[in-house]
């Protein structure tokens, strides 16, 4: 279901994003599957079929939408090899590699400071 273009939630999101770029970063990186996709690509899992095989439960549409969002944010690059069958690979851009370093740091901080609920 699409958001109403005049909803107060959307207005609040825009206000928060304008106030601090961190809110925009957290909105992007906090999306389901995005961090996992980046981490897999960092580990040289860089083809659509490989990513799909490693992300149990993700649909083709969701994986494709997330890859497109990461490309739009310039965190990934896409290489298309003109061969039969067509081969497409995704790689971290320089800003994607910088973000991965930060994500690893956040993960380490979380391991030290965030209690995990095992229920």
Image (tube, helix red, strand yellow):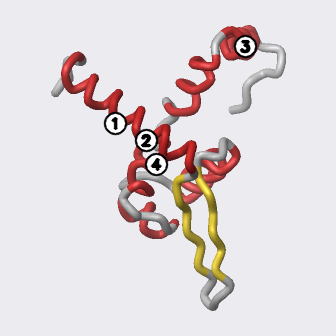
From the image, which quarter does the N terminus lie in? top right
In the image: residue 8, left or right of residue 87: right
Frontmost of labels 4 and 1 is 1
Cα–Cα gap, marks 3 and 1: 26 Å
x, y (%) of residue 35?
44, 41
x, y (%) of residue 46?
47, 65
Viewer-closest of 1 and 36: 36
Local crowd size for mark 1, using a 10 Å CA cut-off: few (<14), some (14–19), many (≥20): few
Q: Are marks 2 and 4 in contact (CB under 8 Å)?
A: yes
Label 2 vs 4, first from the N-terminus? 4
Q: Which residue is mark 4?
A: 38
Quarter-of-image position of residue 8: top right
Local crowd size for mark 4, using a 10 Å CA cut-off: few (<14), some (14–19), many (≥20): many
Q: Which residue is mark 2?
A: 100
**Secondary structure at numbered mark 1:** helix
Q: Which residue is mark 1?
A: 104
Cα–Cα gap, marks 2 and 1: 6 Å
Label 3 vs 1, first from the N-terminus? 3
Label 2 vs 3, first from the N-terminus? 3
x, y (%) of residue 45?
41, 64
Residue 17's place in the image compared with 90, above or below, is above
Q: Which residue is located at x 53 percent, y 45 percent? A: 96
x, y (%) of residue 87?
59, 79
Q: Which residue is mark 3?
A: 18
Cα–Cα gap, marks 3 and 4: 25 Å
Label 4 vs 1, first from the N-terminus? 4
- Kindly give the residue lying farthest to the bottom in the view shown: 84
Local crowd size for mark 2, using a 10 Å CA cut-off: few (<14), some (14–19), many (≥20): some
């Amino acid at each position: 279901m699409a958001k109403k273009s005049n909803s107060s939630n959307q207005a609040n999101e825009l206000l928060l994003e304008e106030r601090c770029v961190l809110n925009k970063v957290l909105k992007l990186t906090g999306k389901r599957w995005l961090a996992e996709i980046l981490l897999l690509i960092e580990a040289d899992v860089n083809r659509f079929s490989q990513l799909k095989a490693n992300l149990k439960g993700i649909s083709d549409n969701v994986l494709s939408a997330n890859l497109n969002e990461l490309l739009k944010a310039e965190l990934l690059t896409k290489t298309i090899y003109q061969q039969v069958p067509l081969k497409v690979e995704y790689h971290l851009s320089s800003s994607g590699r910088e973000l991965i370093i930060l994500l690893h740091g956040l993960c380490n901080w979380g391991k030290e400071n965030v209690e995990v609920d095992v229920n």
